């Protein structure tokens, strides 16, 4: 599935519309073409964030979340005044004495992705060439049996300075984040307009993790597996300040020209660190935007796309 956006001049505001169904046979890619936003990265801390949202480790590889499920340690409270003037107490992320862990589990069966959500930085504005791009994506599974999550609140700040904390309350969640150790990110420039009818002829090459089509799509600018970006400098996954598992990449537009770029999130059938156990199906939905000019459905390799 491709969401085509252009790199252009000053940004303009957009709205998110209802998720569009992804009709893709067993495949391994999810692609979007976008523009370039400002990076939205959590403030640096020496203490890892706690897992607040239920998570499924699809291939058995985890992000080693802090704490122990069922045994939270909430030792250092933080008070702030909310928008209605009430004083609220939370337990901030990034504090050594505060630890908690949402319910999480290693998958015991194939994991089908229910929903793919591209990050707000890709969805909320047209993206200029002058700013770095934070590319983010989240995979979600609808649960038949709820899993326990921690209620989180924003305690002030914005973007890189925003603080998040747990209230200490838990809730039953009907969804869980999915972490697949076989995720791959590919970014390619389109050599034709997003509206070109011949663009539908490009093909996904699962062996190399890229779209191919002479004169239609260029060689990848980025083509990276999550397993190779663990130090945070490349495509990687993290537990965010809000406590969710999110895939992310800091994409610099330096040296790029204005035009349409396709961003593809794929599940690599040739994953070197685990046996692929995560799949995007015809039932998977994807969040996109009102500025989307085209949504291209295309088969790839085994796995799924959205």
Image (spheres, rainbow, N blue to C red):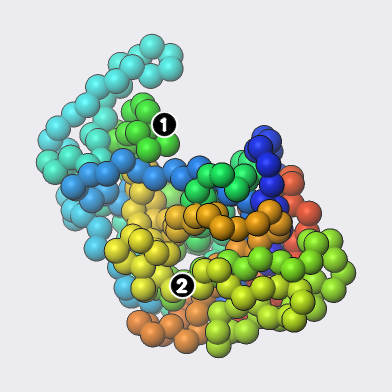
In the image, residue 244 sits, relative to residue 85, either above or below, namely: below
Where residue 64 sits in the image (x, y, percent)? 24, 63
Where residue 190 sits in the image (x, y, percent)? 71, 66
Picture quadrant of residue 266: bottom right
Residue 158 numbered tag? 1
Residue situated in front as seen by the camera: 239 or 228:
228
* Residue at 71% from the left image edge and 73% from the top image edge: 217
Residue 169 shows up from this direction: no
| Secondary structure state at the residue bearing disc 2 | strand
* Residue at 73% from the left image edge and 80% from the top image edge: 213
Where residue 25 sits in the image (x, y, percent)? 68, 79
In the image, residue 49 sits, relative to residue 230, either above or below, namely: above
Q: Nearer the viewer, mark 1 or mark 2?
A: 2
Q: Are marks 1 and 2 in contact (CB under 8 Å)?
A: no
Residue 189 shows up from this direction: yes
In the image, residue 247 sits, relative to residue 83, either above or below, namely: below
Pointer 1: residues within 10 angstroms few (<14), some, or many (20+)? Answer: few
In the image, residue 76 sits, relative to residue 40, either above or below, namely: above
| Secondary structure state at the residue bearing disc 1 | loop
* Residue at 62% from the left image edge and 68% from the top image edge: 188
Instruction: Tell me the CA gap for discs 1 and 2.
Output: 29 Å
Q: Quadrant of the N terminus?
A: bottom right
Pointer 2: residues within 10 angstroms few (<14), some, or many (20+)? Answer: many
Q: Which residue is mark 2?
A: 224
Picture quadrant of residue 215: bottom right
Residue situated in front as seen by the camera: 134 or 114:
134
Q: Quadrant of the C terminus?
A: bottom right
Left or right: where 195 falls relative to 24? right
Q: Residue furthest front?
A: 255
Where residue 15 sits in the image (x, y, percent)? 68, 38
Of mark 1 and mark 2, the one earlier in the sequence is 1
Left or right: where 121 falls relative to 228? right
């Amino acid at each position: 599935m491709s969401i085509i956006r252009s790199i252009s001049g000053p940004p303009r505001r957009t709205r998110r519309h209802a998720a569009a169904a992804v009709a893709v046979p067993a495949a391994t890619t999810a692609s979007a073409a976008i523009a370039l936003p400002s990076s939205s990265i959590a403030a640096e801390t020496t203490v890892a964030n706690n897992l607040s949202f239920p998570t499924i480790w699809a291939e058995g590889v985890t992000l080693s979340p802090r704490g122990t499920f069922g045994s939270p340690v909430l030792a250092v409270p933080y008070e702030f005044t909310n928008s209605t003037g009430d004083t609220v107490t939370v337990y901030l992320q990034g504090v050594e004495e505060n630890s908690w862990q949402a319910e999480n589990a290693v998958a015991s069966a194939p994991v089908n992705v229910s929903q793919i959500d591209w990050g707000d930085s890709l969805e909320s504005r047209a993206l200029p060439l002058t700013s770095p791009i934070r590319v983010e994506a989240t995979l979600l599974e609808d649960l038949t049996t709820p899993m326990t999550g921690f209620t989180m609140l924003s305690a002030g700040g914005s973007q890189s300075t925003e603080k998040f904390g747990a209230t200490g309350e838990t809730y039953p969640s009907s969804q869980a984040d999915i972490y697949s150790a076989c995720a791959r990110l590919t970014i390619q420039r389109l050599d034709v307009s997003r509206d070109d009818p011949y663009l539908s002829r490009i093909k996904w090459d699962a062996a190399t993790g890229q779209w191919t089509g002479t004169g239609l799509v260029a060689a990848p600018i980025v083509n990276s597996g999550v397993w190779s970006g663990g130090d945070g400098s490349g495509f990687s996954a993290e537990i965010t300040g809000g406590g969710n598992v999110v895939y992310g990449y800091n994409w610099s537009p330096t040296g790029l020209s204005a035009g349409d770029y396709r961003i593809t999130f794929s599940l690599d059938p040739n994953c070197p660190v685990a046996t692929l156990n995560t799949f995007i199906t015809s039932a998977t939905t994807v969040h996109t935007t009102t500025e989307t000019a085209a949504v291209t459905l295309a088969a790839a390799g085994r796995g799924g796309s959205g």
